[in-house]
């Protein structure tokens, strides 16, 4: 893409032109012409200021319903919102995606709701390589809050969570097995635990259970981290956004947001280094005639030394 086309696209982002936003995201997803110019030209201040919320939890807990309610509330607060839906590759939630689309339709005509879905499969060992760039493009197009909805707590979801400033884990009564399976990873990734479907029996017991797990976290910041919602009735949504707001202030005041971002950028940079080096290194390996005569670890060390000695 000639430089002036990249500039036109960047101007389109600044103008919040939906076609420019879609085009820019497609260019980064496909590693297309002009990708470097576009990514380098994004407004850093807007990227710095945006709030990225990660929403995760087992399929069926109500993540999409909650996301939709959060969008409605954020829109009535006049915030421009970006949504990145990570389409899980597993067939188990295939049906849910269709449901999400229907629910998302109520925001479809709103120019201040920017929606993009992406698949997890196939890139960087399952994680979605362009999610970070998509966040930044949305930020540059004026989105103030970006919600990333993903499923479960597998490795690729953990990597998506890495992109979020604040992570909300959605649970619901009746998800006992999922919750048991997740407990170990839970404390690591979640900032807030949302007990959704609080209209159903068992919600209070689940809240008590979760409060125990989150006691230390709550004490540390003085902000309640276990919250309840009935997403299907838009209940509890204000409290969640209130908590998120207070927690954002806490993170910023303690330099934690900056630290989280820094770690995320380091991780993403490393991912891209591996992604970009792999084809060149594969080719180099194939031209080596002494195949099988050296231990792979020894050869890897030699190749890295060669790489690092080049300026
Ligand atoms: N009773 C009840 N049902 C809900 C609530 N929130 C969502 N649901 C329903 O739970 C199902 C799964 O919700 P969905 O948002 O697709 O879950 P996801 O797979 O986590 O995205 C849908 O049928 C929703 O209508 C709630 O607060 N109470
Ligand atoms: Mg969903």
Image (cartoon, rainbow, N blue to C red):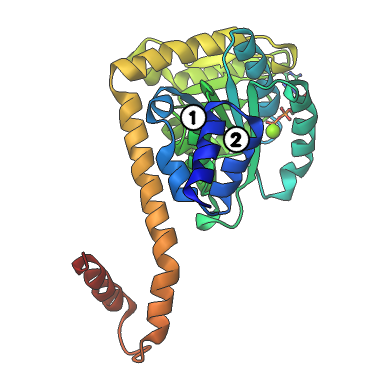
Question: For this rendering, which residue is in front, 137 or 281?
Answer: 137
**Can you tell which quarter of the image residue 301 is in?**
bottom left
User: At which x and y percent is residue 84?
Assistant: 60, 34
Q: Which residue is mark 2?
A: 21
**For residue 104, side relative to residue 10 (left or right):** right
Which residue corresponds to the image point at 38% horizontal and 72% vertical from the top-left?
281
Question: For this rendering, which residue is in front, 143 or 167?
Answer: 143
Q: Which residue is mark 1?
A: 140
Which residue corresponds to the image point at 65% horizontal and 39% vertical from the top-left?
117
Which residue corresponds to the image point at 40% horizontal and 60% vertical from the top-left?
274
Q: Earlier in the sequence, mark 1 or mark 2?
A: 2
Q: Which mark is residue 150?
A: none
Decide: few, some or many residues near mark 2? Use Cα within 10 Å; few <14, some 14-19, many ≥20: many
**Can you tell which quarter of the image residue 21 is in?**
top right
Q: Give the answer, above or below, for where 74 lies relative to 29.
A: above
Q: In the image, ligand 1 is in what quadrant?
A: top right
Q: Give the answer, above or below, for where 14 lies relative to 249.
A: below
Helix, strand or loop status at disc 2? helix
Question: For this rendering, which residue is in front, 147 or 108?
Answer: 108
Question: For this rendering, which residue is in front, 16 or 86?
Answer: 16
Q: Is residue 85 visible?
A: no
Q: Is residue 94 visible?
A: yes
Q: Which corner quadrant holds the C terminus? A: bottom left
Q: Give the answer, above or below, for where 36 lies relative to 261.
A: below
Helix, strand or loop status at disc 1? helix
User: At which x and y percent is residue 240?
Assistant: 55, 13
User: At which x and y percent is residue 67?
Assistant: 64, 23
Separation of marks 1 and 2 at Cα, in angstroms: 9 Å
Q: Are marks 1 and 2 in contact (CB under 8 Å)?
A: no
Which residue corresponds to the image point at 47% horizontal and 16% vertical from the top-left?
225
Distance from mark 1 CB to nearest ligand 2 atom below 8 Å = no
């Amino acid at each position: 893409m000639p430089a002036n086309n990249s500039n036109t696209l960047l101007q389109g982002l600044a103008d919040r032109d939906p076609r420019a936003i879609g085009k820019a995201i497609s260019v980064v997803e496909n590693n297309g012409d002009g990708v470097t110019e576009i990514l380098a030209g994004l407004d850093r201040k807007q990227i710095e200021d945006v709030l990225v919320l990660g929403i995760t939890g087992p399929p069926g807990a109500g993540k999409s319903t909650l996301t939709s309610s959060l969008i409605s509330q954020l829109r009535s607060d006049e915030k421009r919102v970006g949504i990145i839906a990570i389409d899980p590759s597993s067939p188990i939630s295939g049906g849910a995606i269709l449901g999400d689309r229907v629910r998302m339709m109520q925001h479809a005509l709103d120019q201040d709701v920017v929606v993009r879905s992406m698949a997890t499969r196939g890139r960087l060992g399952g994680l979605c390589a362009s999610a970070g760039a998509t966040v930044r493009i949305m930020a540059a197009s004026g989105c103030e809050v970006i919600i990333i909805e993903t499923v479960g707590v597998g490795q690729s979801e953990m990597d998506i969570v890495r992109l979020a400033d604040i992570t909300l884990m959605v649970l619901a009564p009746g998800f006992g097995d999922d919750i048991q399976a997740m407990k170990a990873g839970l404390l690591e990734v979640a900032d807030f635990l949302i007990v959704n479907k609080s209209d159903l029996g068992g919600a209070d017991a689940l809240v008590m259970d979760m409060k125990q797990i989150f006691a230390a976290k709550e004490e540390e910041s003085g902000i309640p981290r276990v919250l309840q919602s009935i997403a299907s009735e838009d209940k509890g949504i204000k409290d969640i956004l209130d908590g998120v707001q207070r927690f954002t202030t806490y993170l910023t005041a303690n330099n934690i947001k900056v630290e989280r971002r820094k770690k995320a950028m380091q991780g993403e940079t490393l991912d891209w280094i591996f992604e970009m080096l792999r084809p060149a290194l594969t080719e180099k390996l194939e031209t080596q005639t002494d195949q099988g005569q050296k231990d792979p670890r020894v050869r890897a060390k030699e190749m890295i030394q060669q790489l690092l000695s080049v300026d």
